[in-house]
């Protein structure tokens, strides 16, 4: 899934010419990062109703590069990944003027209270432990993207 820039249901539409790669997408853009491709597929399924563009990465280095190039509106970031873990990624993101204001949500199997506190101190805006309910991830993304609440 890492080779796909946008999921099949969220193809970007292109507007006017610009040198900024982020400005070509007319939709809100989500970067989902997890080293388990099944988790990325679940996220794509969970976020599909929002109608946002979706890009993915399966490691921290790729996530950092994609965040700097595409400047997504929100990042859903796993913690335990190869090459660079999620805590290192968020530290780099928050130091970069291009990415420091992007909300970053930790989506992780680390579920202890101490883990949550440590991740929030590291710079994450919010935290969601795995396994999560699809409604939980959708509600968090809606909150940070300021989208209207879902009607069930």
Image (cartoon, rainbow, N blue to C red):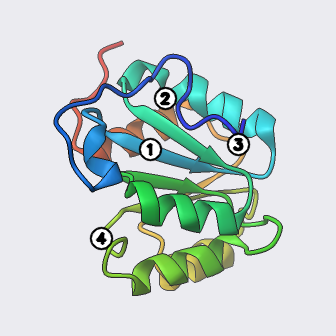
Pick the quarter of the image with the N terminus: top right
Residue tagged 2: 47
Residue of label 4: 101
Residue 115 is drawn in which quadrant?
bottom right
Distance of mark 2 from mark 1, alpha carbons? 9 Å
Q: Mark 2 or mark 1: name the one nearer the start of the chain.
A: 1
The local crowd at label 4, few if under 14, some if 14 to 19, many if 20 or more residues have their Cα within 10 Å, is some
Determine which residue is flagged by label 1. 30
Q: Give the left or right position of residue 56, taking residue 47 as reference.
A: right
Query: Which of the two discs, 3 and 4, sits closer to the camera?
Result: 3
Is 14 left, or right, of 86 in this rendering?
left
For marks 4 and 2, give the CA distance: 21 Å
Q: Tags 3 and 2 in contact by the CB under 8 Å rule?
A: no
Residue 59 lies, in percent from the top left, at: 73, 60
Instruction: Give the CA separation, mark 3 to mark 4.
Output: 24 Å
Which is nearer the eye, 112 or 60?
60
Q: Residues within 10 Å of mark 3 (few under 14, many from 20)?
A: some
| 8 in relation to 102, above or below | above
- Dot 3 falls on a residue whose secondary structure is loop
Contact, CB < 8 Å: mark 1 with mark 4?
no
Q: Which residue is mark 3?
A: 2
**1 or 4: tag closer to the N-terminus:** 1
Closer to the observer: label 3 or label 1? 3
Q: Do the residues under discs 3 and 1 have CB atoms within 8 angstroms? A: no
- CA–CA distance between discs 3 and 2? 17 Å
């Amino acid at each position: 899934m890492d080779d796909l820039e946008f999921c099949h249901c969220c193809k970007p539409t292109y507007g006017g010419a610009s040198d900024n790669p982020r400005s070509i997408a007319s939709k809100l853009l989500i970067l989902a990062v997890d080293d388990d491709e099944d988790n990325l597929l679940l996220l794509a399924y969970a976020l599909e109703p929002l109608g946002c563009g979706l890009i993915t990465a399966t490691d921290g280095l790729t996530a950092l590069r994609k965040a700097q190039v595409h400047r997504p509106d929100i990042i859903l970031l796993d913690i335990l990944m190869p090459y660079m873990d999620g805590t290192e990624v968020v530290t780099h993101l928050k130091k970069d003027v291009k990415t420091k204001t992007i909300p970053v949500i930790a989506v992780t199997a680390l579920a202890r209270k101490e883990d949550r506190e440590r991740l929030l101190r590291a710079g994450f805006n919010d935290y969601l432990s795995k396994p999560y309910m699809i409604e939980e991830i959708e509600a968090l993304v809606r909150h940070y993207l300021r989208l209207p609440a879902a009607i069930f």
